[in-house]
């Protein structure tokens, strides 16, 4: 089976600060991979390297069997083919911690913007799909509202609908619930659980151990830019082998 997303030996530094020190990740079709770790461990940087919002200085990004072509070395390394990057981002939707909705557009306009402009989808067709997706995430009556008129949980669900509107092969989530209070967090978790049950391939950076346990089929614990431990989420969370992971879980439960 060809993995949907494969990251091999990913290295990333900002100046002298080495954030990722050779990280591997594989997500096959239908996999939900959860990334956990303390702040600064490299989780968000890793998924930003996956869709090239950040440029890895070493290692390979392979999407559906196709390696991304790079040119240059080290801090000067960059993708060699802009069309290849565009295609990757079209098929690998990302949902951010802070929603990143366009404030001047309605929720429906936010959802259909990329399908219409990037995929050249007819507007009426995009609206039809957009409405179905807003219904799916439980805010079908909010299409004509602006982001500022919605709660944080509703905005995050709108951001998920926007990502799904591209009909991607896989989705990346960067701390999708950390900006929300527990009640609103539950709304978003429910949507992610639905996507997982439907077999959506996802990589999720999360601080929520319950979400990692309930939704993921593979869990990776990053520590100081390296994989410290990984495996079945329940096994890893219930029987951590490394002292660092034991300390991390004690702190999150405390």
Image: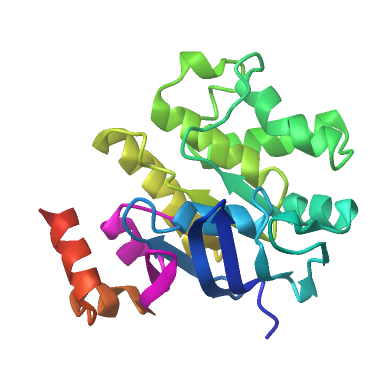
- Is residue 200 visible in the rendered image? The answer is no
- Viewport quadrant of the N terminus: bottom right
- The extreme bottom residue here reads 1
- Is residue 187 visible in the rendered image? The answer is yes
The answer to which of 200 and 92 lies nearer the viewer is 92
Q: Is residue 220 left or right of residue 112?
A: left
Q: Is residue 15 above or below residue 152?
A: below
- Give the total number of marks visible in the rendering: 0
Q: Is residue 199 left or right of residue 225?
A: right
Q: Is residue 153 magenta?
A: no
Percent across and percent down for residue 215 are 39, 63
Residue extent of the magenta highlight: 205-229
Q: Is residue 107 above or below residue 253?
A: above
The answer to which of 12 and 173 lies nearer the viewer is 12
Residue drawn 10% across the image and 53% down it: 254
Q: Is residue 111 above or below residue 76?
A: above
Q: Is residue 218 magenta?
A: yes
Q: Is residue 146 left or right of residue 229?
A: right
Corner quadrant of residue 227: bottom left
Percent across and percent down for residue 110 are 67, 27
- The extreme left residue here reads 254
Residue drawn 85% across the image and 33% down it: 117
Q: How is the image coloured?
A: rainbow
Percent across and percent down for residue 179 are 36, 34
Residue drawn 48% across the image and 33% down it: 98
Q: Is residue 135 above or below residue 2?
A: above
Corner quadrant of residue 140: top right
Percent across and percent down for residue 33 are 47, 67
């Amino acid at each position: 089976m060809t993995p949907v997303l494969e990251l091999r030996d990913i290295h990333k530094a900002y100046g002298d600060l080495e954030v990722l020190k050779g990280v591997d990740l594989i997500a096959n079709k239908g996999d939900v991979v959860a990334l956990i770790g303390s702040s600064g461990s490299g989780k968000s940087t890793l998924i930003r390297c996956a869709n090239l919002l950040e440029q890895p200085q070493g290692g390979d990004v392979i999407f559906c069997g196709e390696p991304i072509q790079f040119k240059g070395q080290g801090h000067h390394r960059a993708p060699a083919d802009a069309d290849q990057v565009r295609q990757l981002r079209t098929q690998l939707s990302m949902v951010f911690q802070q929603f990143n909705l366009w404030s001047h557009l309605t929720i429906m306009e936010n959802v259909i913007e990329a399908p219409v402009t990037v995929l050249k989808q007819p507007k009426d067709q995009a609206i039809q799909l957009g409405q179905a997706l807003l219904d799916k995430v439980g805010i079908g009556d909010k299409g004509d509202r602006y982001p500022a008129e919605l709660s944080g949980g509703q905005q995050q669900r709108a951001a998920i609908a926007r990502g799904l509107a591209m009909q991607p092969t896989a989705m990346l989530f960067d701390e999708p619930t950390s900006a929300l209070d527990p009640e609103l967090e539950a709304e978003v978790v429910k949507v992610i659980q639905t996507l997982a049950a439907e077999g959506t391939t996802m990589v999720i950076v999360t601080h929520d151990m319950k979400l990692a346990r309930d939704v993921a089929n593979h869990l990776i614990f990053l520590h100081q830019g390296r994989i410290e431990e990984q495996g079945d989420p329940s096994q890893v969370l219930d029987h951590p082998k490394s002292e660092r992971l034991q300390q991390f879980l004690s702190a999150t439960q405390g």
